[in-house]
Image (cartoon, rainbow, N blue to C red):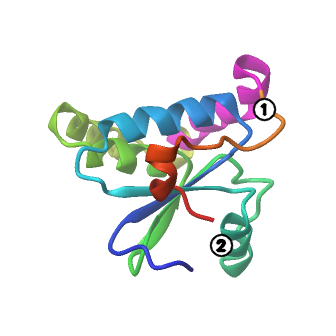
Amino acid sequence: MENLDGKQLIFFDGVCNLCNRSIQYIIKRDKKDLFRFAPLQSSLGEAFIQERQIDTSKVDSIILYEPDVAYYTKSTAALKIGQAFGGGYKLLGIFEWVPRPIRDWFYDRVAKNRYRWFGKQDACMIPTPELTAKFLG
């Protein structure tokens, strides 16, 4: 695993249009520079999945990795990312009171249909030169 210098790493589906738009949304709101990014399809993403024996038939859209703490998937990852922006986004913590299986059921409905609803690219997103340092893998 690359040295993250205290940053959290977001693994995402690099060919999914919804996921790529979500990453752009996160980058714009990441005023504290908390996050780094890597496609699940990258060598880093594949190594992480293998190392932690993550079943990609069940988790294939987003993983939040906090070095030396834990990794989070699905709705929990999305909520933790949103809360990290601070301000009104901290209110997303209310949804953590909803049992994870219920939150993940809704998350899975969107994830299952994301290519049909939002489209898919042939290759992973290529970051602009200004954003290259935020992408690993």
Neighbourhood count class around disc 2 (C-alpha, 10 Å): few under 14, some 14–19, many 20 upward: some
Which residue range is magenta in the image? Answer: 103-119
Quadrant occupied by the N terminus = bottom right
Residue 122 in the figure: left or right of residue 5: right
Residue 61 percent coordinates (x, y): 66, 46
Task: Please check the rendered image and state whether residue 108 is part of the magenta-colored stretch, yes or no.
Answer: yes
| Residue under numbered circle 2 | 48
Type of amino acid at the residue the image marks with label 1: Gln
Residue 121 percent coordinates (x, y): 78, 32
Residue 53 percent coordinates (x, y): 72, 75
Count of numbered badges drawn on the protein: 2
Q: Nearer the viewer, mark 1 or mark 2?
A: 1
| Residue under numbered circle 1 | 121
Depth order, front residue of 106/130: 130
Depth order, front residue of 76/134: 134
What residue sits 62% from the left and 29% below the top? 18
Type of amino acid at the residue the image marks with label 2: Phe
